[in-house]
Image (spheres, rainbow, N blue to C red):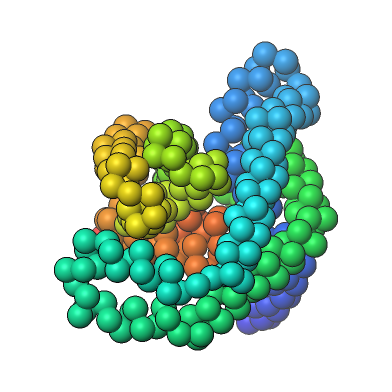
Amino acid sequence: MRSRLSFWVYLVFFLALLAAFLYILAPFFDPIAWAVVMSVVLYPLYSFLRRKIKSESVSALLVVVLVFFVMVVPLSVLTVVATQQVLAVSIKLFSLLQTFRPEEFLSRLLEHPLVKENRELLEPVLSYLKSNEFRTSLLNALNNFFTFLANKLKNLGSTFFHVFVFMLTLYFLLRDGAKILNELKTLIPMKREDTEEILRTVYRTVLAVIYGTVGTAAAQSIMGYVGYSLAGVDYALLWSLLTFFAAFIPPFGAAFVWVPLDLYLFATKGVKPGLTLLAFGTLFISTMDNIVRPLVMKHGIKLPYVALFFATIGGFLQFGFIGVFLGPIILSTLLVSVKIYEKRIMGAG
């Protein structure tokens, strides 16, 4: 009786300390989560270097330096360039809205064949475009965007610190990750083969999601830049960067960017640019999702599409961009846990 009481007291004490420690780490959740994901992806490279160099510390340091120059520096440059283009677009829109004349815009819009054919259906929309409420809403939205952008620029110091936390965590996970994992295996109250199966599933999921989604997003972003440039879209680099991030969001992915952009081209620049982007977007940008992702993920994990959809969207809404990867990882771990339960518990019954 005394030993059981001691066990429960110790368990409560341990869980309280664990909760306090996790609470302390909460402000660094994003960089630590990214470091965990990237350590799984880069561990084969670290293992290769360790075999060649015979030093865990030097091998981990080389991988971190490589990540810095291959990922951090290019992303920082792209962010700066994209920010400049966002500011240029925003200033242009702000100036345009200040001198905006709904009558001139509507007169051109009413000449469009699609609008002429559906004039009665579009009448409420046209009336709203004439109102001062529409202009006020646009100006308020733009002001809110400027405020948001200013707040992000103020937080650059915090962003740099998070990058430092990411790099530092990645270094120690690469160097000591295997030892930490072996310690955790001994603490998990499960059969060793079940623990190994869960860890293998997590590993395959991370690789499949990273290689599949990032590879697809990169391919669609590159195709997007080519298509936007051919169609004469202004600020093609900015739109291609937005296409990269939109590619992670199912079910339409990159189409969230290029389809509205194409409609804008039809309305403002004419049929030829619109058809150019429509053809390029359909044949190349969106098609990349059906070529690259299956090619990369065919050796990974298979998850029900509906469940994967909700896991990805829910992860994104709850955790931000890192949730795009955490959602499928949690889902795949849940499914393999159900299989282990069926085998160990239900089978035993």
Question: Is 83 placed above or below 105 here?
Answer: above
Residue 294: x and y in percent read: 30, 37
| Location of residue 51 (image quadrant) | top right
Residue 217: x and y in percent read: 44, 42
Is the C terminus in the top left, top right, bottom left or bottom right quadrant?
A: bottom left
Question: Is 232 placed above or below 248 here?
Answer: above
In the visual, does 216 lie left or right of 95? left
Query: Residue at the spot x=62%, y=66% of the render?
Result: 94
Residue 158: x and y in percent read: 79, 58
Residue 110: x and y in percent read: 29, 68
Q: Nearer the viewer, residue 106 or 129?
A: 106
In the visual, does 345 lie left or right of 121? right
Q: Nearer the viewer, residue 101 or 279?
A: 101
In the visual, does 142 lie left or right of 205? right
Query: Residue at the spot x=45%, y=36% of the render?
Result: 229
In the visual, does 123 lie left or right of 76? left
Query: Residue at the spot x=79%, y=46% of the render?
Result: 164
Q: Which residue occupies the extreme top position in the image?
A: 52
| Location of residue 109 (image quadrant) | bottom left
Q: Is residue 85 in sight in this rendering?
A: yes
Question: Is 15 placed above or below 40 here?
Answer: below
